[in-house]
Image: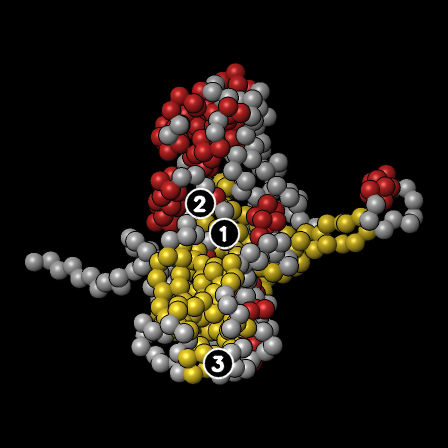
Amino acid sequence: MGDFLEQIEKPNSETMHTDHVRAGNISDEVAIKVDHVSKIYKLYDRNRDRLKEALHIGKNIHCREHYALDDVNFEVYKGETVGIIGTNGSGKSTILKIITGVLSPSAGNLDINGRISALLELGAGFNMEFTGIENIYLNGTMLGFSEKEIDSKLESILEFADIGDFVYQKVKTYSSGMFVRLAFAVAINIDPEILIVDEALSVGDVFFQNKCYRKFEDFKKQGKTILFVSHDLGSISKYCDRVILLEKGHKIGEGEPKEIIDMYKKVLVGQLDRTADTNKSEQALSGSKWKDLMQLNPNVDAYGSGLAEFEDYCAYDNSGTVTNTIIKGDEFTVKVKVRFFETIQDPIFALSFKNMQGTEITGTNTMFEKITTGICEAGSEYIVTFTQNMSLQGGEYLISLGCVGYREGNFTVYHRLYDVFNLTVISSKNTTGFYDMNSTVIVTKV
């Protein structure tokens, strides 16, 4: 590898940081300090305006400033696992790229105390014309390791990647799975003091994901510092000591995982301001349409006789917040409003859950629950609530609603909405199967 490494310009401490990074100017307890950091992009109405500004010519140049980040502050302490969450476009990836030196901030400063290994866009920095082995040495050298140091880590990298002799082939010949395995193996086994992860734990097959999570847990046990960005709120809840919430470039929350995840759920449905006090979530439910606060399936399968109709529906959590996201173990409610266009005797109201593969997992209805609904007259409206504890495993589920019954002796579907909205279950502890038995387990030494 010596001849190959001689072709690589080894980065020094100056090239590893932008001018805004003052490595070592923070206390020993702090690994990362983000100090009033902003990132501004100029948006031009016309391409020629961009060219004019680059060449410093012309006066009538029209552009708008877009703040990808606006005056963001936070610290990550050594040994902490800190999560960053937010909607698309909130600035999550931008802040990680600034921390890792991929981007320079427009304003503010950044302090780094420790060697960083980053899992941003897996394989970023790989040369497609190099073999897997050559890319291992390339990435290690870029992180400041000597050839001897990389030699000592090579066996663990190859064992983790587990791609066999393909490691001697050019990476452009790899399948996406092999590429991901090698990229993750290099980043995770390079022994960083600070690990930066951006959505990288959800890659590869289920067995490789399990291996990645075990390695992630090993890092935590070793007291490594981890900064973790993910849309998987279950992983955020399980692994993070503290969570930061970004929205449209601003930091709007920081604290315990459950507190910030609850805040994020309100952001997702535009209720953050509405739920400033306990009464306002109820006001949201009494507004014009509950379903307007939900993320709905645009291709819902709806059909029925037209004798009744679901006018409105939603799910809300134990704080009364309308949401598509429920914490495993919490109580939640699915609420529906049905209007009847003809008088119907004993209609049956139903709720069911499917997984993403279409398998019906569980469900109930007023007949199973031995609730007599009586005569629902034409023009009347009824509200039905299904309240229960969430015992399903963490994951995505599809909700279906039904209003059915017997009319003149024949089973009739008055209105049915298949897969009308999804529920995301956030879990910090998944067991085997579809639902959690909530077992109490006692181990006693005899």
Residue that extends furthest to the top in the rendered view of this protein: 3
Instruction: Identify the secondary structure beneath mark 1.
Output: loop
In front: label 3 or label 1: 3
Report helix, strand or loop for mark 3.
Answer: loop
Residue 46, how many percent across, how many down? 83, 45
Instruction: Check whether the beta carbons of the residues at disc 2 and disc 1 lie within 8 A of each other.
Output: yes
For residue 300, above or below residue 177? below
Tag 2 residue: 201
Q: Residues within 10 Å of mark 1 (few under 14, many from 20)?
A: many
Which amino acid is tagged 3? Answer: Thr
The tag earlier along the polypeptide, 3 or 1, is: 1
Against 270, is 380 above or below? below
Residue type, mark 1 in image: Ser
Q: Label 1 belongs to which residue? A: 230
Question: What is the quadrant of residue 56 in the picture?
Answer: top right
Kindly identify the residue that appears in the image at 43 percent across and 23 percent down. 166
